[in-house]
Amino acid sequence: MEQIVRAILNSRTVSLDPVEGSFDIYGFKCLGMAEKPVDIENMSDSLVYIWHVKSDILPVSRNEIERWSIDAPGDRHWILSEREISADLFRDFPDNFRAIIWGPEKLSRWIGESVLRGDLIVGSNPINGTLDQNPSIDSIPIKEKTEIVTLKTIFDLEDWLNNEPSGSINSIPVFLVVKLWKLSGVMISPDSTKDSKKWSFIEDPWMNKIFPFTEEQIFLNPPNLHQIQPSKDKWLSNQNLKSNLKPILDYRKKEKSNDGIELVKSTMLEWWRVDLSSLIFDFEYAQIPAWRLKFDDGEEKILHSHNGMTYNL
């Protein structure tokens, strides 16, 4: 965990300078000094000493804090603790002594956000193994790619947690597997004029939604996180896919016409309808960021980064 914290600090702080001496004080390890760390507020007036507290069964005690405060240099501190630590332990300290305390819950959220921002690259194997190579739509081939398309996060974890009831929630960044569809087909006007078109859509079985895909949605240089797949019955069948796409693909187009001998020009909207029989489908798997939430009572859910909704595993 210390190496992970150091990696994030190196990418997120203005500077991370070593300190003289080890200052390994009863489990409090000084990682260095930072000037104006971007992740904490109201600490811009001096250097901040950054501390890491390793994981243990018991919370940090008052005696440990008192022993740490005796040897700790300076009066500005940021404590990143894997152990439960109460801010009340610092209540009796002098007014000029300031400490920002992050316990295991906030620390885990900070690490998760850093991963999804691309500040930290985490390597791992998928939770559920390799992607399913037997989709429900047998007639549609799988397009093999060495790099899976990843969509950007559009919902903030911190905002969601701020609106939740109090309680400890552990969050782990993951990716949800979706499908990126590439379609081509023919649109037909009321006078039977034909026009060839191409489209790209995301099928998200978690939200039960299909939405257009553009390159601006791509998350560049994504981390390598666990992947979570939906159950096979969540994917749309060929028939359901077409019926869901039809109202999205049909569109109205402005048409100009000449009325009568005076050649008065008029503009009207005419429906162009997709010829479902002309559609050619191809897809590749893609992924959307999410968080795996574990609550105090042991319940686990998935928090989707596009709509802020939670789903059962």
Image: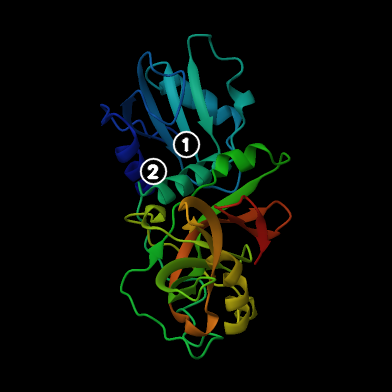
Residue 299 is left or right of residue 237, and the answer is right
Numbered marks: total: 2
| Vertical placement of residue 125 versus 96, above or below | below
Residue 21 is left or right of residue 52, and the answer is left
Question: Is residue 226 something one can see in this rendering?
Answer: no
Q: Report the residue at 45% width, 61% height from top.
A: 213
Q: Report the residue at 37% width, 63% height from top.
A: 123
| Spot occupied by residue 66 in the image (x, y as percentages of width and height) | 53, 23
| Spot occupied by residue 281 in the image (x, y as percentages of width and height) | 45, 80
User: CB atoms at circles 1 and 2 under 8 Å apart?
Assistant: yes
Numbered disc 2: secondary structure:
helix
Residue behind mark 2: 5
Q: Quadrant of the C terminus?
A: bottom right
Question: Is residue 94 something one can see in this rendering?
Answer: yes
Residue behind mark 1: 80
List the single residue furthest toward the top. 95
Judge by depth and name the residue closer to the eye, 204 or 2: 204
Q: Report the residue at 55% width, 38% height from top.
A: 103
Q: Amino acid at mark 2?
A: Val
| Vertical placement of residue 102 versus 128, above or below | above
Give the class, few, some or many, for how many residues have Cα within 10 Å of label 1's Cα (few <14, many ≥20).
many
Q: Amino acid at mark 1?
A: Leu
Judge by depth and name the residue closer to the eye, 211 or 87: 211
| Spot occupied by residue 5 in the image (x, y as percentages of width and height) | 39, 43
Numbered disc 1: secondary structure:
strand
Distance from the alpha carbon under mark 1 to that under mark 2: 9 Å
| Vertical placement of residue 286 versus 303, above or below | below
Residue 295 is left or right of residue 83, and the answer is right
Judge by depth and name the residue closer to the eye, 252 or 154: 252
